[in-house]
Image (spheres, helix red, strand yellow):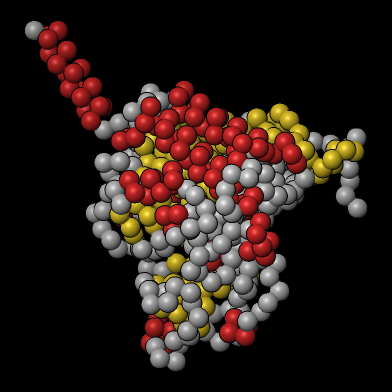
């Protein structure tokens, strides 16, 4: 009898376990891909059948925000904070003395604690000193070029400028430019292998691609295959990579227990012409706080949980990934660490259509440029059309507040400040609230320090820079 009871109890226990296994998470983070670069977001130039299928089977998030540049955006995604709160306002360079503070608790650290296998495959860009690497921020393993692929340097022995390919904390290889053509494929193979190895336990796969950052290096198999030049070739390879990941999830029957999020770290590098992407209907590009600089083509996929073919225009962003994944993993956020992100799982599951954000804040370095609430966006500082663009339109030069209704005009050109002084006042008050916390220009009391090291060195011996 006792034995029978035990067996019954064990059965019940295993039924409970089976009823609610912890979901897996895959975050695919593209570099410098524009809002208008993939077909679910209106691209007719680039062919992206896998992303189209992902969107058809999942949810498009049309008001999902990142930060204007690479490092800032990655800090937001991993910490759930606006980048200036964690003192990552811009971009890190090789052998810099600063990085994301190891004391920050990243989404990977939360998930590790919840029993997840974690890995980071691709571009890290939160500092290249040992204490800043992914393996010190909650990722059990790392494989990738740790910063932007245009940050090449020559080795001591001369020769071509190279970028390091890291395996955990060691330089596995130094890649000359042409060798960069391998990385998208190798990241993908590594990702598929990780899924295979960890299919029987909860996992977090963070896949921040080196693509689409300049210099463009699609694999030879994709060169010349698209109708949109080298840029289109590389988009096609990224799309292929997404297909490989989803196929692996299906192969191991994990599709109903895995949330996949696809998004980009900032807008397209428009000043590079054909080598940069496009922001579609949005104004502006990478490096700026117009919508084109920070609104990203975003898709959430989780068959059976996220409704197929759904669209959400509610305000959300990379800051929300940490609280959302921690919630879905059954974890608890630490109450002693202030974050800006919100749990958007009710939005993804279709339980609500409302954004959990009262406002979204557009920081450019440490300066608060704009604030959005509902359809209204108030710009309070001069803005640029993007990194490297000399043209400075008159309407963006002014320090007078500009009010746009993004629901009515996504391209933010018609200043409605005079017609809606009450909205201007409301958004100004929201801006003031954030300035009293994170600050603007000067850091506010809510800002935490960056990580810092003495005597930083490059990951491989390089010639001293003159
Ligand atoms: Mg970028």
Image vertical order of residue 322 relative to residue 17, above or below: below
**Horizontal arrangement in the rendering, residue 437 relative to residue 347 (left or right):** right
Q: Quadrant of residue 41?
A: bottom left
Q: Is residue 248 visible?
A: yes
Query: Residue at coordinates 70% horizontally, 42% vertically from top-left?
Result: 128
Please provide percent x and percent y for residue 5: 12, 13
Please provide percent x and percent y for residue 73: 56, 55
Q: Nearer the viewer, residue 376 or 56?
A: 56
Query: Residue at coordinates 67% horizontally, 48% vertically from top-left?
Result: 216
Please provide percent x and percent y for residue 443: 61, 66
Please provide percent x and percent y for residue 379: 52, 78
Residue at the left extreme, as displayed: 1
Q: Is residue 364 visible?
A: no
Q: Nearer the viewer, residue 173 or 51?
A: 51
Query: Residue at coordinates 33% horizontally, 39% vertically from top-left?
Result: 330
Q: Quadrant of residue 347?
A: bottom left
Residue at the bottom extreme, as displayed: 418
Image vertical order of residue 134 relative to residue 324, above or below: above
């Amino acid at each position: 009898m006792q034995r029978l009871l035990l067996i019954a109890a064990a059965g019940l226990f295993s039924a409970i376990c089976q009823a609610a296994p912890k979901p897996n998470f895959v975050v695919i983070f593209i570099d410098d891909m524009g809002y208008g670069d993939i077909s679910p977001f209106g691209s007719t130039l680039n062919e992206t059948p896998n992303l189209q299928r992902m969107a058809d089977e999942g949810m498009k998030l049309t008001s999902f925000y990142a930060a204007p540049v690479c490092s800032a955006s990655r800090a937001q995604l991993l910490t759930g904070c606006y980048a200036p709160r964690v003192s990552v306002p811009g971009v890190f360079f090789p052998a810099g003395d600063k990085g994301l503070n190891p004391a920050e608790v990243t989404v990977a650290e939360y998930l590790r604690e919840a029993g997840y296998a974690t890995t980071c495959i691709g571009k890290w860009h939160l500092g290249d000193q040992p204490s800043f690497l992914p393996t010190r921020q909650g990722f059990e393993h790392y494989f990738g070029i740790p910063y932007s692929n245009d940050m090449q340097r020559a080795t001591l022995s001369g020769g071509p400028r190279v970028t390091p390919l890291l395996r955990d904390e060691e330089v596995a290889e130094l890649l000359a430019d042409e060798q960069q053509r391998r990385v998208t494929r190798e990241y993908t193979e590594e990702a598929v292998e990780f899924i295979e190895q960890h299919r029987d336990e909860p996992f977090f796969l963070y896949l921040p691609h080196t693509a689409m950052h300049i210099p463009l290096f699609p694999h030879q198999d994709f060169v010349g295959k698209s109708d949109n030049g080298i840029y289109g070739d590389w988009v096609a390879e990224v799309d292929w990579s997404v297909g490989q990941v989803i196929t692996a999830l299906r192969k191991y029957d994990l599709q109903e227990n895995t949330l996949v999020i696809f998004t980009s770290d900032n807008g397209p590098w428009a000043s590079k012409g054909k080598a940069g992407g496009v922001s579609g209907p949005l104004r502006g590009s990478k490096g700026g706080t117009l919508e084109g600089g920070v609104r990203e083509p975003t898709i959430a996929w989780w068959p059976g949980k996220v409704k197929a073919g759904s669209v959400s225009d509610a305000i959300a962003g990379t800051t929300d990934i940490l609280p959302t994944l921690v919630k879905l993993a059954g974890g608890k956020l630490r109450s002693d660490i202030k974050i800006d992100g919100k749990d958007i799982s009710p939005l993804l599951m279709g339980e609500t259509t409302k954004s959990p954000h009262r406002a979204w804040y557009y920081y450019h370095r440490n300066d608060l440029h704009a604030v959005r609430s509902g359809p209204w966006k108030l710009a309070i500082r001069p803005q640029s059309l993007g990194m490297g663009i000399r043209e400075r339109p008159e309407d963006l030069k002014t320090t007078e507040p500009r009010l746009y209704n993004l629901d009515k005009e996504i391209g933010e050109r018609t200043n409605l400040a005079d017609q809606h002084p009450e909205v201007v006042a409301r958004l100004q008050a929201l801006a003031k609230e954030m300035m009293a916390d994170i600050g603007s220009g000067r850091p506010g009391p809510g800002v935490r320090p960056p990580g810092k090291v003495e005597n930083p060195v490059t990951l491989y011996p390089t010639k001293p820079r003159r």
